[in-house]
Amino acid sequence: MSEYVNKIYEIVIEKDPEQPEFHQAVKEVLESLVPALERHSIFKKEKILERIVEPERVVMFRVPWLDDNDDIQINRGFRVQFNSALGPYKGGLRFHPSVYLGIMKFLGFEQIFKNSLTGLPMGGGKGGSDFDPKGKSNREVMKFCQSFMLELYRYIGPNVDVPAGDIGVGSREIGFLYGQYRKIVNQNDGVLTGKGLEYGGSLIRPEATGYGATYFAEEMLKIKGLNLKGKICTVSGSGNVAQYIVEKVNQFGGKVVSLSDSNGSIYDPEGINGKKYEYLLELKQIRRGRIKEYAEEFNVEYRPNKRPWDIKCDIAFPSATENEIEKADAQNLVDNGVIAVTEGANMPTSLEGTNIFLEAGVAFGPGKAANAGGVATSGLEMSQNAMRLSWPREEVDARLHEIMVNIHNTTYQVSKQYDKPGNYVLGANIAGFLKVANAMIAQGHW
Ligand code: NDP
Ligand code: 2IT
């Protein structure tokens, strides 16, 4: 069976040789699926792998906008509608200069299995642009979002495709995008998630990815007879996901000692909490400043161009971007006695890094399981919009918690069924895949 899987992988590389991030995401999933394909011969016969690695549809478009000097700027926009077997395409929009088709496809591919794991009826998709919001005025960001939506609106809809945020797309951008969508279609149908509370957003959606990743970490620790209390945690990134991991880890009695951005990291051995945490939220959410300012304000170590992975910790939460834990970083973490690694970001660990964690017996929560709380709560936002009501904070949080516990238990059970107890990579890939594959078979060849 592994020969068959290798053949599929070679075809993927041959078709799009310039998309290494997509190859990496496919490789990880395919390798995990080998034992499942041996148990279920129908998937090969139905050519599920050949079908699942090919997006159902890819839209690429020009995004022209006027900057503050009245110069015309041109960016490229994308929406990859990867798989709709389980429901409307669902997944975030990323605005970052590194965005190209290969990044969009890796994220869309991951999203298929992640959304499947949530148990909610959502297919997988992803979109975005190579636009860089950094250093742009509010007005420029609005102009860009309006132009982006002027094209995207044709391809989305509450029963078709429901985008949300990701890197560079937060509540400000979702507001501008939704305002433009409504203006064009004259419908208040909630087509984006992550909306503001005043116009159809859900309580807890901003916090959901970070809270969910922390709930997932707590469940992995529980299996080992441990919990987060008193644990030293390193977190990378300092955006939406990282911020709410810090809050939840503090609530569970752990201590977060690092954060980072694309310029460097900070090390605060006393923990990022209390007034320092409030400062962080203001710095990042309102002033849009750099993490270096935290180090200056509180007189802690700033480490230019350095990731946090050489800092001794019990739990690591990579929550910035893909491949931020490479082989040497993973080895550092293991050598320093890390117990668990929970991926807040999408594919932050390289394949070599992942193997180092798995071989060392580290509890390793892959992104498609550990960070699924964000999209799950987006699913809850869709439900509330459809019913035209809003649930209280406690109710959304309780549902999020229940979903994360279920994802943990499902992935753990599947890892046991396949004789690799505690291998959450295998568990998440097989569990996520089986549901999608069965739904594809049931709906015929298309
Ligand atoms: P934000 O834009 O809010 O924050 C991103 C953070 O990561 C910033 O601190 C940013 O630093 C840093 N970062 C981004 N790119 C790089 C890079 N190339 N190198 C180093 N640091 C980088 O995004 P989110 O917090 O929403 O997303 C973080 C990760 O979580 C992404 O992988 C995303 O796909 C994933 N994710 C997000 C979900 C969500 O609901 N938002 C849900 C599930 C996963 P800087 O400011 O310098 O760019
Ligand atoms: O990667 C992700 O799961 C997200 N960026 C969130 C997607 C969503 O639709 O909420």
Image (tube, rainbow, N blue to C red):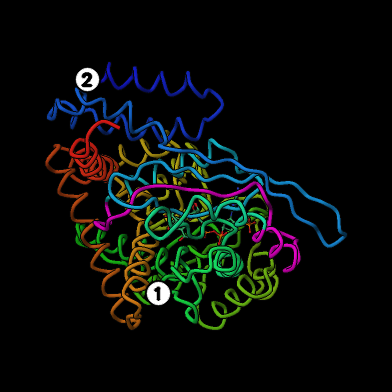
| Image quadrant in which the C terminus is located | top left
- Ligand 1 image-quadrant field: bottom right
Judge whether residue 137 is colored magenta: yes
Q: CA distance from mark 1 to mark 2?
A: 43 Å
Find residue 236 and report its horizontal and vertical position in percent. 52, 57
Height in image: 356 above or below 9? below
Horizontal side of 43 relative to 326 (left or right) equals left
Height in image: 224 above or below 330? below
Question: Which kind of residue does numbered mark 1 sit on?
Answer: Ile
Horizontal side of 368 relative to 441 (left or right) equals right
Indicate yes or no: mark 1 CB to ligand 1 under 8 Å.
no
Residue displayed at 72% across by 69% down = 138
| Magenta extent | 117-146
Q: Which mark is residue 221?
A: none
Question: Which kind of residue does numbered mark 2 sit on?
Answer: Met
| Image quadrant in which the N terminus is located | top left
Between 403 and 76, the one lying in front of the other is 76
Residue displayed at 23% across by 67% down = 402
- Which residue is the site of mark 2? 1
- Which residue is the site of mark 1? 204
Which image quadrant is residue 404 in?
bottom left
Judge whether residue 266 is colored magenta: no
Height in image: 199 above or below 151? below
Please report contact status of discs 1 and 2: CB closer than 8 Å, yes or no: no
One can see residue 214 in this view: yes
Horizontal side of 57 relative to 282 (left or right) equals left
Circle 1 sits in a helix, a strand or a loop, which is it?
A: loop
Find residue 253 and report its horizontal and vertical position in percent. 36, 75
